[in-house]
Image: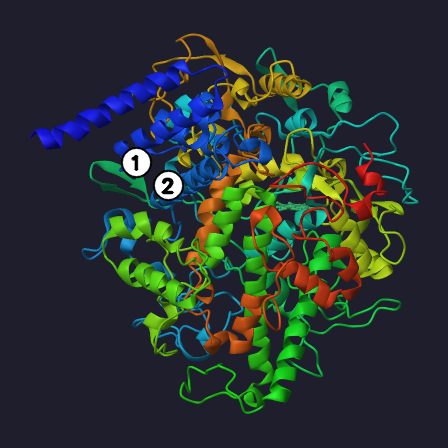
Amino acid sequence: MRPVLFPFALGGLLVVSCLAAIAQNSGPTNPKKQEMLELQACAAAALQGFRPIADNRAQRFQAKVTLLTASCRGGQKAVQYRFTPYVDWSNYWGTGDLSSLPKGYLSTAIPQARGVNGALLDLEYQRIELIKFNLFDNNLTYQNYIVGQNGVVGAALKVFPPLRLPATNPFYAAVGGDGEQICKGDLIRGRTLAGICNDIRNPLMGSIGTPFARNVEFETTFPDQEQNQLTKNRHGGRINLMTPDPQVISRKLFTRTQTANNGCNQGFGSPTFSPDVNCDYQKAPFFNVLAAYWIQFMTHDWFSHLDDGHNGSGMISMGCASHKVNGVETPLTADQADKLGCRPTDLVDKGLVLQDSAPETFTHNGGTYMTRAPKTFANNNTAWWDASQLYGFDDISVKRVKRDPSDQARMLLVPVEGRQGGYLPVLAAGDPFQPQWAGQESVAFPDNWTIGLSFYHNLFAREHNSFVDEFRKQAAKTPNADSGLRNPSDPTRVIRYKDVTPDELFTAARLVVAAEIAKIHTTEWTPQLLYDEPLYKGMNANWSGLLGTGDPDDSKALADIVVKGFGKSKNATKESQWYSAFASGPGIFGLGSKVLRYSITNPDDVNGGVNHFGSPFNFPEEFVTVYRLHPLLPDLIEVRDVSKDPNQIVQKVAVIETFEGKATEAMHSRGMANWGLSMGRQRLGLLMLHNHPAFLQNIKLARLDTPTQQVDIAALDLTRDREHGVPRFNEFRRQYGLHQLTSYDDFVDQRLPVDSPQRKQQEETVRQLREVYGTHVCDASKIITDAQVNDDGTPINDCLGHPNGSVVDNIEDVDTVVGFLAEFTRPHGFAISETQFVVFMLNASRRLFSDRFFTSSFRPEFYTQFGVDWVNNNGPGPVQMEAGTPNGHRQPVSPLKRVMIRNVPELRPQLKSVVNVFDPWGRDRGQYYSLEWNAKPEAATDPAFQR
Ligand code: HEM
């Protein structure tokens, strides 16, 4: 026995002595001693082994590690902040800027690697558990997901009967009618208009009109309906659609504070666009206005509750009716409303509802479950990342997409006097459009049209044509060469370059543009939104693989392990627990596409790379919630002129003056290059409370036939979430496997010095939260959730750890949007909060995993070889590398930089020193994820840098 026991005894000793040493080590210490202690902690943590994946949601990771692991990966700092509710990895070595590296250690590289790799490991644990615990489909597939089907456990199911095409669908017969349904022929060649046949065995998945999914247990949705005892206990009758009052919340917690007499004029600026007026806002130093509009452009591809610009019938109040006085909801007087600036007579149209009949229930292993949420809502867009905002998603929207009559492969672009390059045509008589869209460019998704949307729609229409033009040049050079394209109805016919028809080229160009957009979002926008090393690595891993060897044989071998080893397995544990982790090796993009003897008529080849983890793909309502990002917008755009001095702000144009038809006018009068430069130079608004654009609180919407015609978008964001039954903030976090908060005080960033002005400001916000949401006397006998338990295994009750009968904050009632904007504690460089981030982590990966055009159908047979190379190399010709090593990485010239230089060549000089198009163009990026706001030498005279 001895030889076996001895190492265990030694190991136990090491663990105990190490824990004791860490506990004693609270003050400043000698770096060498600290380094030794961390190494011992690493050894002791390794002896304890990897954390198992949780068996049930109550045991989830919550991104909180053991004392030893924290010490190993982040030293004293990581140990010190373990008590906060927030993720531990943000305090590891190397996960911030240069100051996150240790001083006085033998090497900084080793702790940095421990910290960054440790962070990546924590993130992967979170993703694995998110896939395991957070998928709830509303298409009536949920019962099989829980119970299994024909001996296959739910998480391994791949075919979902409710996602067959109904007999009313025009393609019903083509996919097999009432027999086995499988898409083939023309239906699988590219992205279909309505989004059917992406998954060829589940034709309806992700198509227009299918219900939004959920990421939270159905029983926790619609908390104000208090459907079960837990929700009753959680909210105690305190919440409903109008309580707490949405406009009061907006005015008290969202309004931007303005310097007196700055000319902001409620966000409407100066009618002459004077550059001397100002609207104050909290600015993100590392993210620009182009990034704000990028995400609006993306959401218009992914989802819409509105149907062609309209909501449901009937109106609802927007509040401005009551507030809390001494904790009691009390009517607002006219004077009080006036003082607050809210409008009691505002009304808005009700949201559209898909189903609101009571859902059926089923029982399994002693539990009772709902088969869907009590209400469902249709996604009136295709859920796929298919550039549907550009190309259309139904019979109406596609009529607004104009193809060039002289060449059907191209988009129609028309000249605008005095401007270089073509522009999208304006909506004309005969086009289907809502009155409020008059004067706008003719595009598939015209709602809430802005200067940023105009910019990106024009840019990618030009990019579409650039691809077509370059393809044609290649066809002229090598007309008889194999283009790689195949027609599944005639699969053996080689399609030479000269044989590719205009329609085929249009379809391939759409695939290429959609994939470029997905690549920009994954490898350029997101790493700037989450500006630190773990996320840079993580996002690039989704695209090109964690190992990033660049060797096609390596990545094929890794992909084979994932797709063949896991994708076809019926073992759900393996399937859902390790698939995503292993996929990080080769990357999700292109998974299953590197198959020897690939056949376009073999469904296993065409569809083999996708994995829905047993639950069909659509965005959940909670995803829409975390994309309510209106604080990103400034009130005024600082306009610059590319032909003059780019450092000069020539005018300040109110964003509202670039809304709907005025966006098109503004685009034509100043041109793509000037808007690109202006939005590229300006910082966007930080996602935090007290930072909502004033103009959006006062906007007039032409579609509204109401006394004010106005609506407060901050209040509307809350109202819509309440209509959609999104759980409130604390339960939302628990559902996603994050640690709960126990009072409003938990929002304060504990890393700030006690007397710092920033901390004082945060404490003031906490006071306001308490005023708006209130407090109550708690009752420890009331259990409020089953999603998590206390550290000692006891159920979580109404007192959240405070003594029974004490006055506790109504933290359970805080709207999720308010809560995530109040999260002051964030990982370095995070423009969003960790609560938003977990929602992205799950759904952004799924959006790649579920889409065959990003996995097994990312192939020349669909994209053409020219198209595959274009996506991989960021344009025609070989990949181009950026000079130097930004943040320590050799990096290709970014995809969006190349798209812009190609299609708006006037911007080439402005983009020369830009590494990431979403980082303000005049900012000196400094070293290692610096967030400093310092000018590059060429931007030294830019007034934006004057403090
Ligand atoms: C001038 C700029 C913008 C205006 C005027 C605007 C206006 C609006 C309006 C009126 C709605 C409400 C629709 C309804 O429920 O009735 C809305 C919804 C929304 N907006 Fe914006 N928005 C702007 C920019 C942005 C940006 C930059 C984002 C960033 C992601 C964004 C994200 C959203 C989302 C996620 C929704 C919910 C959509 C849905 O329910 O399907 N918006 N916006």
Q: Nearer the viewer, residue 584 or 183?
A: 584
Residue furthest out toward the bottom: 480
Q: Secondary structure at mark 1?
A: loop
N-terminal-most mark, 2 or 1: 1
* Quadrant in which the C terminus appears: top right
The amino acid sitting under disc 1 is Arg
Relative placement, left or right, of 354 versus 606 is right
Q: Residue at x 23, y 27 (%)?
A: 11
Q: Are circles 2 and 1 on residues that touch, CB within 8 Å?
A: yes
Residue 39: horizontal and vertical position, in percent?
Answer: 37, 30
Residue 171: percent from left, percent from top: 44, 74
Task: Find residue 51 and name its label.
Answer: 1
Q: Quadrant of residue 246?
A: top right
> Under 8 Å from ligand 1: the CB of mark 1?
no
Q: Quadrant of the N terminus?
A: top left
Q: Which residue is the site of mark 2? A: 125
Q: Give whichever of 408, 169 is nearer the camera.
A: 408
Relative image position of residue 230 (x, y in whole percent): 37, 26
The residue sitting at 73% across, 42% down in the picture is 683
**C-alpha span from label 2 to label 1:** 9 Å
The answer to whether residue 212 is seen in the rendering is: no
Q: Position of residue 514 (x, y in %)?
A: 56, 64
- Using the image, determine if residue 221 lies above or below residue 191: above
- Tell me what residue is drawn at x 59 percent, y 35 percent: 98
Q: Quick one: label 2, few (<14), some, or many (20+) residues within 10 Å? A: many
Kind of residue indicated by mark 2:
Tyr
Q: Residue at x 51, y 40 (%)?
A: 837
Answer few, some or many: residues within 10 Å of disc 1's Cα (few below 14, many 20 plus, some between 14 and 19): few
**Secondary structure category for the residue under label 2:** helix
Q: Is residue 587 left or right of residue 934?
A: left
Residue 179 visible in the current orientation: yes
Residue 942, placed above or below residue 748 = below
